[in-house]
Image (cartoon, coloured by chain):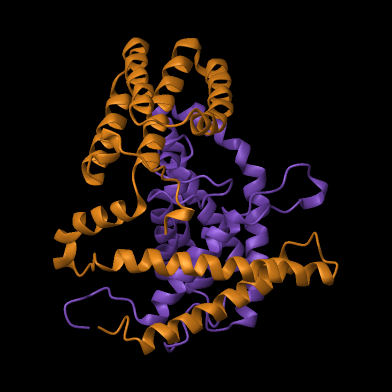
């Protein structure tokens, strides 16, 4: 199911760290960034995250893609923050965001969806005594991705029908039929799942 | 259901899964140009309100949670092809997490209307849903900026769009409830009350 994912294959140390530990490291980094208030140290942390991109061997093309999402947002935040709270606070907030977001993106780029699903299933194991069924996570992910594919087709068909009725600009002429078909699809899926014994165990 | 207090019956599971996919498709699908606007309007944040309005609190909230989990796992399902854990760390991360509460609150209010919710109840419920999203999103943003007031002012940008969307969601939900009367209770269950 990776063709949909954002994962970039690689063999760097960052790729090989188990997903669960990598996630804990990411969380600690986010907490660190929120606690640290000095621009200098935030700069150091940001520098280390950028270094991580080199270690992971992320192609400049992908780095550029991430920068293109981050820079306009950071620019806007910086401008508003400067206006409302002053230059120092604007710099701190933007460095915090840059470090946290760059690290989080690096995590997603170097972690396979399957590995993450497996890590979540392992991490949720202690909750089994409360009635949670961790082994269901993989099934849910797979089922939802199949439903995304089915609904995309349905959405284009509904859009076509809407054009044919020349109701092109109306949101409700699209949303209502699409939702009705979505619910119908859900009923069919429910019957199919019940026939396979899912949900009544 | 031995040993599992919260196992969903197949029909509920299917609705949760399919609605999570519905929210994803709202993001994949190109936006609409409303009233001659130059920038297409993003429809995805209507998803949680619709989930609560149509499926009710439990399944609506679960479907939003499932959708966000798929995003966090690294699937680019947020509008604009964004995904991964990063969107949750950004300034608008709290608004994403707020979606879950939004769907639950909308569902709880809508559920009180029998036999099916009218426009007024839906408008009220979706207004509450939007407010709940802000109540989660603004303090979250303030954790980055260190200033609640500044975060609140910056969130005002979303207010006009959200106002239009909550009316649209309510109108759409009224029509869907009319077309599929059992959607809140599910096809396998008898309506309580």
Q: Residue furthest right?
A: A166
Q: Nearer the viewer, residue A111 or A156?
A: A111
Report the residue at 43% width, 22% height from top. Answer: A93
Report the residue at 47% width, 64% height from top. Answer: B20
Q: Chain A in the picture: what colour?
A: orange
Residue A116 sits above or below residue A99 on the image: below
Instruction: Answer whether residue A97 is visible to the viewer in this image.
Output: yes
Tell me residue B59's x, y (percent).
42, 70
Tell me residue B68's x, y (percent).
42, 54
Q: Chain B in the picture: what colour?
A: purple
Quarter of the image containing the C terminus of chain B? bottom left
Q: Is residue A97 left or right of residue B2?
A: right
Residue A103 sits above or below residue A140 on the image: above
Residue B107 sits above or below residue A91 on the image: below
Tell me residue A41's x, y (percent).
31, 13
Report the residue at 57% width, 22% height from top. Answer: A75
Quarter of the image containing the N terminus of chain B? bottom left
Tell me residue B190's x, y (percent).
43, 89
Report the residue at 33% width, 15% height from top. Answer: A44
Residue B18 sits above or below residue A194 on the image: above
| Quarter location, residue A158 | bottom right
């Amino acid at each position: 199911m990776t063709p949909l994912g954002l994962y970039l294959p690689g063999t760097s140390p960052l790729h090989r760290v188990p997903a669960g530990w990598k996630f804990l490291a990411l969380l600690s980094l986010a907490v660190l960034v929120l606690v640290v208030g000095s621009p200098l140290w935030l700069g150091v942390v940001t520098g280390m995250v950028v270094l991580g991109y080199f270690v992971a061997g992320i192609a400049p093309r992908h780095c550029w893609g991430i920068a293109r999402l981050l820079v306009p947002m950071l620019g806007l935040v910086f401008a508003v923050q400067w206006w409302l709270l002053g230059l120092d606070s604007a710099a701190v907030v933007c460095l915090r965001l840059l470090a946290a977001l760059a690290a989080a993106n690096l995590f997603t780029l170097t972690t396979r969806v399957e590995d993450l699903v497996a890590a979540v299933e392992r991490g949720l194991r202690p909750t089994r005594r409360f009635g949670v069924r961790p082994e269901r996570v993989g099934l849910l992910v797979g089922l939802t991705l199949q439903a995304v594919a089915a609904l995309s087709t349905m959405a284009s068909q509904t859009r076509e029908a809407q054009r044919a009725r020349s109701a092109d600009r109306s949101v409700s002429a699209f949303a209502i039929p699409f939702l009705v078909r979505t619910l119908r699809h859900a009923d069919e899926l429910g019957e199919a799942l019940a026939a396979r014994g899912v949900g009544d165990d | 259901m031995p040993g599992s207090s919260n196992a969903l019956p197949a029909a509920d599971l299917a609705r949760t899964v399919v609605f999570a996919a519905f929210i994803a498709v709202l993001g994949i699908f190109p936006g609409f140009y409303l009233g001659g606007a130059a920038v297409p309007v993003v429809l995805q944040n209507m998803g949680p309100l619709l989930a609560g309005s149509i499926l009710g609190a439990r399944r609506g909230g679960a479907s939003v949670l499932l959708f966000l989990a798929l995003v966090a796992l690294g699937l680019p399902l947020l509008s604009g092809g964004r995904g991964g854990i990063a969107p949750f760390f950004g300034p608008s991360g709290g608004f994403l997490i707020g979606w879950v509460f939004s769907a639950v609150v909308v569902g709880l209010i809508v559920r009180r209307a029998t036999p099916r919710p009218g426009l007024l109840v839906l408008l009220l419920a979706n207004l509450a849903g939007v407010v709940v999203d802000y109540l989660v999103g603004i303090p979250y943003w303030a954790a980055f900026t260190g200033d609640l007031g500044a975060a609140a002012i910056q969130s005002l940008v979303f207010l006009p769009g959200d106002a239009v969307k909550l009316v649209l969601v309510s109108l759409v939900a009224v029509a869907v409830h009319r077309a599929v009367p059992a959607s809140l209770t599910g096809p396998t269950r008898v309506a309580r009350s």
